[in-house]
Protein backbone atom coordinates (compact mmCIF):
# COMPACT_ATOMS: atom_id res chain seq x y z
CA UNK A 1 0.00 0.00 0.00
CA UNK A 2 1.09 3.58 -0.56
CA UNK A 3 2.71 5.33 2.38
CA UNK A 4 2.20 8.80 3.76
CA UNK A 5 2.92 11.40 1.10
CA UNK A 6 4.21 14.89 1.80
CA UNK A 7 5.10 17.84 -0.38
CA UNK A 8 7.19 19.76 -0.93
CA UNK A 9 10.26 17.88 0.29
CA UNK A 10 12.30 21.04 0.71
CA UNK A 11 11.40 24.70 1.08
CA UNK A 12 13.54 27.78 1.60
CA UNK A 13 11.86 31.07 2.48
CA UNK A 14 12.71 34.44 3.96
CA UNK A 15 11.51 35.30 7.46
CA UNK A 16 8.07 36.87 7.60
CA UNK A 17 7.01 34.99 4.45
CA UNK A 18 4.26 32.39 4.42
CA UNK A 19 4.56 28.70 3.64
CA UNK A 20 2.25 25.72 3.39
CA UNK A 21 2.88 22.00 3.59
CA UNK A 22 0.65 19.23 2.31
CA UNK A 23 0.11 15.70 3.61
CA UNK A 24 -1.82 12.76 2.22
CA UNK A 25 -2.19 9.97 4.79
CA UNK A 26 -2.44 6.25 4.18
CA UNK A 27 -5.88 5.36 2.82
CA UNK A 28 -8.29 4.54 5.61
CA UNK A 29 -6.26 6.14 8.38
CA UNK A 30 -8.57 8.38 10.36
CA UNK A 31 -5.90 9.89 12.60
CA UNK A 32 -3.36 12.35 11.24
CA UNK A 33 -0.48 14.03 13.08
CA UNK A 34 1.87 16.90 12.32
CA UNK A 35 5.21 16.87 14.13
CA UNK A 36 7.99 19.46 14.15
CA UNK A 37 11.54 18.10 14.31
CA UNK A 38 14.17 20.73 15.01
CA UNK A 39 17.75 19.74 14.23
CA UNK A 40 19.22 17.70 17.07
CA UNK A 41 15.88 17.02 18.73
CA UNK A 42 13.15 14.44 18.57
CA UNK A 43 9.86 15.21 16.85
CA UNK A 44 7.31 17.23 18.80
CA UNK A 45 3.59 16.99 18.12
CA UNK A 46 2.04 20.16 16.75
CA UNK A 47 -1.50 18.97 16.03
CA UNK A 48 -3.51 15.75 15.88
CA UNK A 49 -6.67 15.23 13.84
CA UNK A 50 -9.28 12.52 14.20
CA UNK A 51 -11.06 12.57 10.84
CA UNK A 52 -11.50 16.32 10.35
CA UNK A 53 -11.70 17.25 14.02
CA UNK A 54 -8.80 18.47 16.18
CA UNK A 55 -7.87 16.16 19.07
CA UNK A 56 -4.76 17.94 20.37
CA UNK A 57 -3.26 21.25 19.32
CA UNK A 58 -1.84 22.24 22.68
CA UNK A 59 1.68 22.75 21.29
CA UNK A 60 0.70 24.53 18.09
CA UNK A 61 1.82 28.20 18.06
CA UNK A 62 -1.58 29.43 17.03
CA UNK A 63 -0.50 33.01 16.42
CA UNK A 64 1.40 31.87 13.33
CA UNK A 65 0.63 28.21 12.66
CA UNK A 66 -2.65 26.84 11.33
CA UNK A 67 -3.71 23.46 10.05
CA UNK A 68 -6.77 21.98 8.48
CA UNK A 69 -7.95 18.62 7.34
CA UNK A 70 -10.82 19.04 4.95
CA UNK A 71 -13.03 16.00 4.35
CA UNK A 72 -10.97 14.00 6.83
CA UNK A 73 -8.28 13.02 4.32
CA UNK A 74 -5.56 15.42 3.14
CA UNK A 75 -4.15 18.02 5.47
CA UNK A 76 -2.28 21.29 5.11
CA UNK A 77 -0.09 23.02 7.67
CA UNK A 78 0.57 26.73 7.22
CA UNK A 79 3.02 29.10 8.81
CA UNK A 80 2.30 32.82 8.51
CA UNK A 81 4.58 34.70 9.08
CA UNK A 82 7.62 32.44 9.41
CA UNK A 83 10.38 33.05 11.95
CA UNK A 84 13.98 31.85 11.93
CA UNK A 85 13.21 29.37 14.71
CA UNK A 86 10.65 27.64 12.49
CA UNK A 87 13.50 26.05 10.51
CA UNK A 88 12.87 22.34 11.01
CA UNK A 89 11.62 19.17 9.38
CA UNK A 90 7.82 18.92 9.45
CA UNK A 91 6.69 15.33 9.64
CA UNK A 92 3.22 14.06 8.90
CA UNK A 93 2.09 10.72 10.29
CA UNK A 94 -1.12 8.74 10.18
CA UNK A 95 -2.60 5.82 12.07
CA UNK A 96 -5.61 3.52 11.82
CA UNK A 97 -7.91 4.43 14.67
CA UNK A 98 -8.84 1.47 16.82
CA UNK A 99 -5.94 -0.78 15.90
CA UNK A 100 -4.12 -2.54 18.70
CA UNK A 101 -1.20 -0.18 18.91
CA UNK A 102 -2.40 2.70 16.75
CA UNK A 103 0.99 2.47 15.05
CA UNK A 104 1.94 5.75 13.45
CA UNK A 105 3.34 5.68 9.94
CA UNK A 106 5.50 8.63 9.00
CA UNK A 107 5.96 10.48 5.74
CA UNK A 108 9.36 11.61 4.42
CA UNK A 109 8.97 15.09 5.87
CA UNK A 110 9.34 18.63 4.55
CA UNK A 111 12.61 20.36 5.40
CA UNK A 112 11.96 24.08 5.93
CA UNK A 113 14.78 26.61 6.01
CA UNK A 114 13.91 30.15 7.06
CA UNK A 115 16.57 32.75 6.16
CA UNK B 1 3.36 14.91 31.43
CA UNK B 2 5.48 12.27 29.81
CA UNK B 3 9.21 12.76 29.25
CA UNK B 4 11.74 10.60 27.45
CA UNK B 5 15.50 10.88 27.91
CA UNK B 6 18.21 9.44 25.70
CA UNK B 7 21.59 10.12 27.25
CA UNK B 8 23.78 8.90 24.39
CA UNK B 9 23.88 11.47 21.55
CA UNK B 10 26.15 9.28 19.43
CA UNK B 11 27.34 5.69 19.40
CA UNK B 12 29.31 3.52 17.04
CA UNK B 13 29.69 -0.22 16.65
CA UNK B 14 31.57 -2.57 14.39
CA UNK B 15 29.65 -4.60 11.89
CA UNK B 16 28.40 -7.93 13.32
CA UNK B 17 28.81 -6.77 16.91
CA UNK B 18 26.12 -5.97 19.48
CA UNK B 19 25.19 -2.51 20.70
CA UNK B 20 22.75 -1.26 23.34
CA UNK B 21 21.03 2.12 23.21
CA UNK B 22 19.69 3.56 26.46
CA UNK B 23 16.38 5.26 27.18
CA UNK B 24 14.67 6.34 30.37
CA UNK B 25 11.19 7.77 30.64
CA UNK B 26 8.83 9.27 33.12
CA UNK B 27 5.07 9.02 33.16
CA UNK B 28 2.26 9.08 35.67
CA UNK B 29 0.09 6.85 33.50
CA UNK B 30 -0.62 3.24 34.44
CA UNK B 31 -1.05 2.05 30.89
CA UNK B 32 1.35 3.16 28.20
CA UNK B 33 3.38 1.98 25.26
CA UNK B 34 7.07 2.38 24.49
CA UNK B 35 8.65 2.43 21.06
CA UNK B 36 11.95 2.58 19.27
CA UNK B 37 11.93 4.33 15.90
CA UNK B 38 14.71 4.35 13.31
CA UNK B 39 15.35 7.35 11.06
CA UNK B 40 17.97 6.62 8.38
CA UNK B 41 19.76 9.58 6.79
CA UNK B 42 17.35 11.46 4.54
CA UNK B 43 14.76 8.73 4.88
CA UNK B 44 11.53 8.44 6.75
CA UNK B 45 11.05 7.25 10.28
CA UNK B 46 10.04 3.63 10.74
CA UNK B 47 9.00 1.62 13.77
CA UNK B 48 11.60 -0.85 15.00
CA UNK B 49 9.98 -2.37 18.06
CA UNK B 50 7.24 -1.68 20.61
CA UNK B 51 6.47 -2.73 24.17
CA UNK B 52 3.26 -2.60 26.14
CA UNK B 53 3.90 -1.51 29.72
CA UNK B 54 1.58 -4.17 31.16
CA UNK B 55 3.60 -6.96 29.56
CA UNK B 56 6.55 -8.20 31.56
CA UNK B 57 8.08 -10.12 28.69
CA UNK B 58 10.60 -8.11 26.70
CA UNK B 59 9.72 -7.57 23.05
CA UNK B 60 11.90 -9.05 20.31
CA UNK B 61 11.93 -8.45 16.56
CA UNK B 62 14.61 -10.46 14.78
CA UNK B 63 17.95 -8.81 15.66
CA UNK B 64 16.28 -6.15 17.80
CA UNK B 65 15.26 -6.68 21.41
CA UNK B 66 14.47 -4.50 24.38
CA UNK B 67 15.26 -4.61 28.06
CA UNK B 68 12.19 -3.14 29.75
CA UNK B 69 12.63 -2.35 33.44
CA UNK B 70 9.30 -0.88 34.52
CA UNK B 71 10.25 -0.02 38.09
CA UNK B 72 13.38 1.77 36.92
CA UNK B 73 11.50 3.33 33.98
CA UNK B 74 14.18 2.12 31.63
CA UNK B 75 13.73 0.89 28.06
CA UNK B 76 16.95 0.02 26.26
CA UNK B 77 17.33 -1.32 22.71
CA UNK B 78 19.78 -4.06 21.87
CA UNK B 79 20.85 -4.58 18.27
CA UNK B 80 22.59 -7.89 17.63
CA UNK B 81 24.75 -8.72 14.62
CA UNK B 82 24.84 -5.05 13.60
CA UNK B 83 24.62 -4.34 9.88
CA UNK B 84 25.69 -1.32 7.84
CA UNK B 85 22.01 -0.63 7.15
CA UNK B 86 21.43 -0.11 10.86
CA UNK B 87 23.24 3.24 10.62
CA UNK B 88 20.58 5.80 11.55
CA UNK B 89 19.14 8.02 14.25
CA UNK B 90 17.26 5.99 16.83
CA UNK B 91 14.45 7.60 18.80
CA UNK B 92 12.84 6.26 21.92
CA UNK B 93 9.20 7.29 22.34
CA UNK B 94 6.31 6.80 24.71
CA UNK B 95 2.56 7.04 24.30
CA UNK B 96 -0.15 6.82 26.92
CA UNK B 97 -3.17 4.62 26.34
CA UNK B 98 -6.34 6.53 25.57
CA UNK B 99 -6.79 10.25 25.15
CA UNK B 100 -4.36 11.94 22.81
CA UNK B 101 -2.22 9.33 21.13
CA UNK B 102 0.71 11.59 20.57
CA UNK B 103 4.18 10.16 20.74
CA UNK B 104 6.64 11.84 23.07
CA UNK B 105 10.15 11.42 21.71
CA UNK B 106 13.63 11.56 23.17
CA UNK B 107 16.37 13.56 21.46
CA UNK B 108 17.70 10.53 19.68
CA UNK B 109 20.94 8.56 19.44
CA UNK B 110 22.98 8.65 16.25
CA UNK B 111 24.25 5.12 15.61
CA UNK B 112 27.03 4.46 13.13
CA UNK B 113 27.89 0.91 12.11
CA UNK B 114 31.46 0.67 10.87
CA UNK B 115 32.62 -1.95 8.37
Image (cartoon, grey):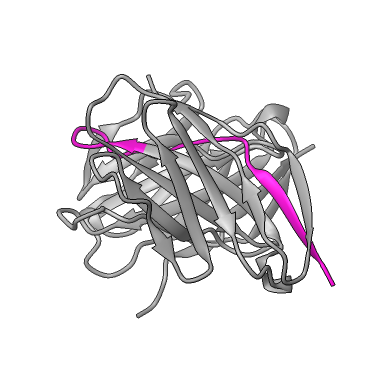
Give the quarter of the figure containing the N terminus of chain B: top left
Q: Residue at x 26, y 24 (%)?
A: B29
Q: Which portion, as a residue range, is magenta?
A: B95-115
Q: Which residue is at a point 69% across and 28% down the rendered structure image?
A: A85
In the image, is A81 to the left or to the right of A35? right
The part of the image, by quadrant, that contains residue A95 is bottom left
Query: Magenta span has B88?
Result: no
Q: For the point 62% across and 36% down, which residue is it?
A: B107
- Residue B14: x and y, percent? 80, 64
* Vertical position of residue B80 compared to residue B69: above or below: below
Query: What is the residue that sits farthest to the right in this orientation?
Result: B115
x, y percentage for residue B108?
Answer: 63, 41
Total number of numbered labels? 0
- The correct choice, above or below, for A71 with respect to B30 in the image is below
Front-most of B99 and B29? B29
Closest to the observer, B85 or A47: B85
Q: Quick check: B56 above or below A108?
A: above
Is B63 left or right of B114, judged from the image as shown?
left
Amino acid sequence: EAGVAQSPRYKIIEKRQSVAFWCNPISGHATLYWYQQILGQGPKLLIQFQNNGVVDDSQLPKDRFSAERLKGVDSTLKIQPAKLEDSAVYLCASSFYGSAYNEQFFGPGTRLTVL
Amino acid sequence: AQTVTQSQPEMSVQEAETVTLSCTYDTSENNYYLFWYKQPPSRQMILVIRQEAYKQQNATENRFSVNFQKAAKSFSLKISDSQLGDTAMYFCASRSEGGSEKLVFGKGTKLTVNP
